[in-house]
Amino acid sequence: MLVGITMNDLLDYTAWERQKWFEWMLQQGQGVLQISAGPHGDGRFERVGELVRHIFSAEKRYVERLSNRPMTDPARIPADSIDALFQLGQQSRLELRELIEVLPLEEWDAPREVTVISSLLTATPKKIVTHILLHEIRHWAQIATVLRLQGLKDDFHDFLFSPVMGGELRRTSRE
């Protein structure tokens, strides 16, 4: 029998990750959002704040697609405000959790067509929601790398060190 990670585990992990980044960014100050996302991007995100906004707005927009609601314009959220960005994250996560609760079980594996940028994508809600969560994890790792290259670092963000699925990390000193 294969035992795997659940969607709830990924929701819990990304919630923990968001909280850690929110607290760390508050300690660093608003300027951390102005750090360059690097010279070799695809042109959509020039600064860390824009990448954070993308994490949360992508979640919000996929939920809107799956809920057949009008799309939010992410440009209306300032990418230079930690509070505004993470409020967007709270709203997007609330809406995602609501979608998960109300979407009928028989619809989770039924393919849907959604427009993403200028393409038509066919995927199940289960795949789209899984993408939302993995997309976030991938971008937080990207942000962590960009910040480390600027000499800024935070504590461990790895799933292994999170409280999800139990376990504990105790620091020991070496003499």
Image (tube, grey):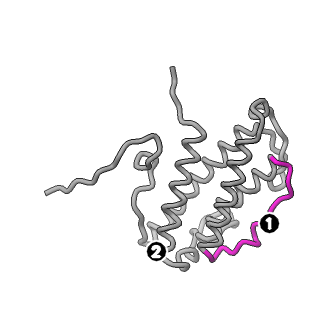
Query: Is residue 149 or residue 106 the one in the foreground?
Result: 106
Q: Which mark is residue 165?
A: none
Q: Give the quarter of the image for residue 91.
A: bottom right
Tell me the residue at 61%/71% (across/down): 49
Q: Quadrant of the C terminus?
A: bottom left
- Answer above or below: position of 134 versus 139: above
Give amino acid for label 2: Gln
Q: Residues within 10 Å of mark 2 (few under 14, many from 20)?
A: few
- Check disc 1 and report the residue beneath it: 73
Label 1, secondary structure: give it.
Answer: loop
Marks 1 and 2 sit apart, C-alpha to C-alpha, by: 28 Å
Q: Is residue 11 left or right of residue 160?
A: right
- The mark closer to the camera, 1 or 2, is 2
Residue 162 location, x and y as percent?
A: 44, 49
- Answer above or below: position of 175 versus 106: below
Q: Residues within 10 Å of mark 1 (few under 14, many from 20)?
A: few
Quick one: label 1 or label 2, which is nearer the N terminus?
Answer: 2
Tell me the residue at 58%/77% (across/down): 34
Q: Give the quarter of the image for residue 130.
A: top right
Q: Is residue 141 left or right of residue 73?
A: left
Query: Is residue 171 or residue 37 the one in the foreground?
Result: 171
Residue 76: in magenta span: yes
Q: Residue furthest top?
A: 1
Tell me the residue at 61%/72% (across/down): 83
Q: Give the quarter of the image for residue 129.
A: top right
Residue 112 location, x and y as percent?
A: 83, 39
Magenta stretch in the rendered image: 67-81
Residue 7: in magenta span: no
Label 2, secondary structure: give it.
Answer: helix
Give amino acid for label 1: Asp
- Check disc 2 and report the residue beneath it: 27
Residue 92 location, x and y as percent?
A: 69, 57
